[in-house]
Amino acid sequence: MLDSAQRLGSLALTQETAVRAFRWMLLARVLEEKLASLYRGGKITGGVFLGKGQEALSVSLGMALRRGTPGDIYAPLIRDQAGRLAFGENVLDAVRTYLGSSLGPTRGRDGNVHRGAPREGYYPMISHLGAMISVVCGALMARRFKGLDGFVGATSIGEGGTSTGAFHEALNLAAVERLPLVVIVANNQYAYSTPNSRQFACANLVDRAIGYGIRGHKLDGTDLAECLEGVGCAVDRARNGDGPQLVVASLLRLAGHGEHDDAGYVDPILKAAPVGRDCIKTAECMLIEREWATVLEMEAWREEALHQVEEAIATAQHEPAPDPNTESWCALSTPDFADTYSVEPQP
Amino acid sequence: MITYLEAIREAQAKALADDPRVYIYGQDVGSFGGAFKATKNLAREFPGRVLDAPISEDAMVGSAVGAAIEGMRPIIEIQYADFSTVGFNQAVNNAATLFWRTQVPCPITIRLPSGGTPGSGPFHSQSMEGLYSLYPGLVVMTPATVEDAYSMLLEAVAIDDPVIFCEHKYLYYHLKAEGLPNEALPASKARIARMGRDATVVTYSAMLHECLAMAEELATEGYEIEVVDLRTVRPLDTDTVLASVARTGRLLAVGEAWPWGGVTAEVLARVATEGFDLLDAPPRRLNAKDTPVPYHPNLWGTHRPTAQTIARSMRDLLRL
């Protein structure tokens, strides 16, 4: 395990890095606030899942990865809007997926957080927790088969997802194959409503790294500087041949599981504790303390983010919805193998 | 002579030789050559491309999805079809939905050594084809002959969609052919394995051989039974089945899987809805008994349909 003195990540804290990270965090927060209000106004069908309180951790991974063809592989989970934006997702595609636009990446076939661009290394999650880790492992194996080197595959999960068999199988496989995999665990204290005391019994989830024979990193997920350095260090180590990296960050989910959930079960003691700090607020303080940004500048950035989000929403709202009459209704890419049987009467 | 198992090995050798994107991943498939020796010597012939996996069916299938996204064509050997339940989630939720969600195809082949053999018991004998066939986005192949084991496995690896390849363990060593085929019927098409005029039996995998034996026996009684080998159960070649029923007017569907739902029920449903007026008698089906697959050969031999029980069912059908 590394302590902070040993961290030498590529995201060494500079004004430029901190400001860039903060602006992605702000954009994610503003976007999610708008999505929540669209949800409350009945404009979004299905769930809305926010990453409020997790932006510092999420953005750190998105920024540490290199997008390209081929570039690094990124399989985010539900609370990763900040990381998605930093990795290169545009706001419009996020909004399109929530609003079900036929021009969005899933064209209305799937919604909300289930979006990606697999060909560009941005993998769309399925809802089954832990399932994406082995998918990233396989992608890294493919790179190895092709003789390609210097890439990292990264994915995020919550503390609840670490209880799955899929999590265990994939981390063990990655360790056996010594893959350049980074798994970021956001320990946000609750899996939906289930507290950590009902989820796991080890002192800290990072201790599991020892069992897998991989390197573990422990972070304060409410501290942007620590996240940038810690996640950057894990990504660098994976890239440079140190094998899989398990990063566990403590923070508190500052929203419900989804916007349908008032999170009334969250212990007020946690909210008042350091783990309950809002990472955007702590980042603001850090920027001001270091004189890297002024309050006025931050207000201007928020305005800019708001404008960008509103523009995307206005665009997506005018885009066509998917049309069931032109939908192919075929799940296979090989037409010869489509099962054409149908009991519907022929028109 | 070449066995069904050797045909599977040869198909994998050809796939590895012809296409650098192909690799094999599964428990004990490396230098050991697999629990059934379906990958015998392949690790030596294709260094670095036939890899032992940890006992992690979920991660094995999940990793295949990621590798497929990156342009590879993985073959995953599950040691026994029964254990594929542990990797089921990745197959039906990740692999089967990927193309539909993203338009990025998922060319993976999951080999399931399937079906019963004497002494294998409840957890090394299962027939999973019906379960996988419930899911859109998957192709489910159930070859019954040496030639099909070879040509269909090559086609499974070649197509851009995830294929559940149900190879029958009972046929591994005993079923033999003169040689490997140079050309083949497309895997998506059923085949008339024996022509007849009095009744149609629709079947697949190891049950084909029980049905052919039944047809031989009934021939001595003066009946000509047409035997349809589905070859692939999803997609189900309904046209070939209906054409046969149109000739014979009688249908019996036979499968080794359990009786609730499944392939035989699907065959009957399709014929009843689309070919009701072709039928001279109510269609029938025969499956394994509705219990886990038993261990003892006496029990196992009665649990699954056999030429004798199929003949009994067919005689009843012919009397109607």
Image (tube, coloured by chain):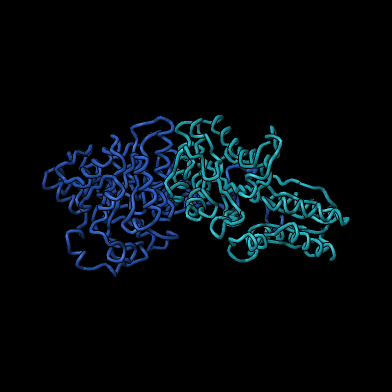
Query: Residue A297 at what x, y percent from top left?
Result: 18, 45
- In percent of the image, x 41 and y 38: which residue is there? A141
Q: Is residue A8 visible?
A: yes
Residue A326: % across, % down: 59, 49
Q: How many marks?
A: 0
- In the figure, what tint was chain B given? cyan
Q: Is residue B222 left or right of residue A315?
A: right
Side of A290 where B225 appears, left or right: right
Residue at point 73%, 53% (across, down): B210
- In the rendered view, tell whether residue B43 sits above or below residue B90: above
Please tell me which residue is depicted at 34% across the width and 44% down the height of the picture.
A175
Can I make out residue A115 in this image?
A: no
Give A168 or A238, whichever is nearer the viewer.
A168
- Picture quadrant of residue A34: bottom left
**Observer-nearest residue: B171 or A136?**
B171
Residue farthest along the right direction in this orientation: B222
* Residue reaching furthest to the bottom: A264
Which chain can be seen in blue?
A
From the top left corner, tell me how far across and down residue B85 is, in percent.
50, 56
Q: Which quarter shows the C terminus of chain A?
A: bottom right
Instruction: Work out whether A13 lies above or below B306.
Output: above
Residue B296 percent location from the top left of the image: 60, 61
When asked about the image quadrant of residue B250, the answer is: bottom right
